[in-house]
Amino acid sequence: MKKIALAIALLACFSFAQTGIFAGLGRGYHGLVGVEQSFLNGHLSANAHWLGYDSDYDFMGGLGVAYRFNGPTGPYVFHASEFLTGRTNDHLYHEELGGVKWDRFYYWRLVFGFGLQHMFNEHLGLFFETGFEFFAGDGSYYTHLDMDDGGLSNDEITFPMVVGFVVQF
């Protein structure tokens, strides 16, 4: 009986699902661009997003989840987890390798925060969000990533803010 109830609950979640695409200016739950799937009449959503492009970064993307208190229009809380990989500007000359060797980095960026989304109609809306970000890398946790040289530090705390639009299908 538990398996039947679970199957019915999963089917109910997917039956009220909506797919959306979004674009924003900033790096929060939504990232720069991505795709989002909303379940449970828009109360729960998950996304895959891309943070942007930088020639020193090979990959800057991740996943996010959000709980929307009032459905698609209204406040929400979110968590975003992104993977960043690339090379630092600290290049070292190695005689054994016959040239310059670039130092590579692999970091996790974690953002927790809240946002506000307003849907003008069933398909088009705007959002604003802010949160607290920190980074995991080099065997510890940090509060700041210097995007220019790829270095982590605890010198400053960043609260990313994002504004953007969403289109739902």
Image (cartoon, rainbow, N blue to C red):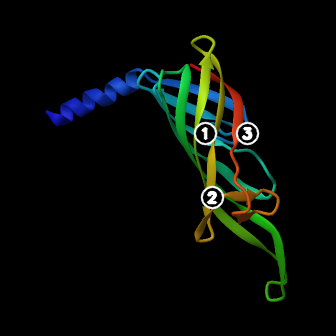
Residue 31 image offset from top left, x and y in percent: 66, 40
Query: Does residue 100 appear in this view?
Result: no
For image coordinates 60% across by 10% down, the residue present is 121
Query: Image height check: is 1 above or below 92?
Result: above
- CB atoms at circles 1 and 2 under 8 Å apart? no
Q: Of 37 and 24, which appears nearest the observer? A: 24
Q: Would residue 151 be found to the left or right of residue 8 on screen? A: right
Quadrant for the C terminus, please: top right
At 70% from the left and 38% from the top, the residue drawn is 161
Taking depth in this image into account, of 26 and 103 the one nearest to the observer is 26
Position of the N terminus by quadrant: top left
Secondary structure of residue under mark 2: strand
In the rendered image, the vertical position of residue 80 relative to residue 129, given as above or below: below
Measured as percent of width and height from the top left, residue 45 is found at: 49, 32
**Amino acid at the residue labelled 2:** Phe
Residues under labels 1 and 3: Cα distance? Answer: 9 Å
Label 2 Cα neighbours within 10 Å, binned few <14 / some 14-19 / many ≥20:
many
Q: For mark 3, what is the residue?
A: 26
Instruction: Give the residue displayed 69% in from the left and 43% down from the top.
Output: 160
Residue linked to disc 1: 29
Who is closer to the viewer here, 161 or 52? Answer: 161
Query: Which residue is the site of mark 2?
Result: 135
Q: Kindly identify the amino acid type of the residue bearing the numbered disc 3.
A: Gly
Earlier sequence position, callout 1 versus callout 2:
1
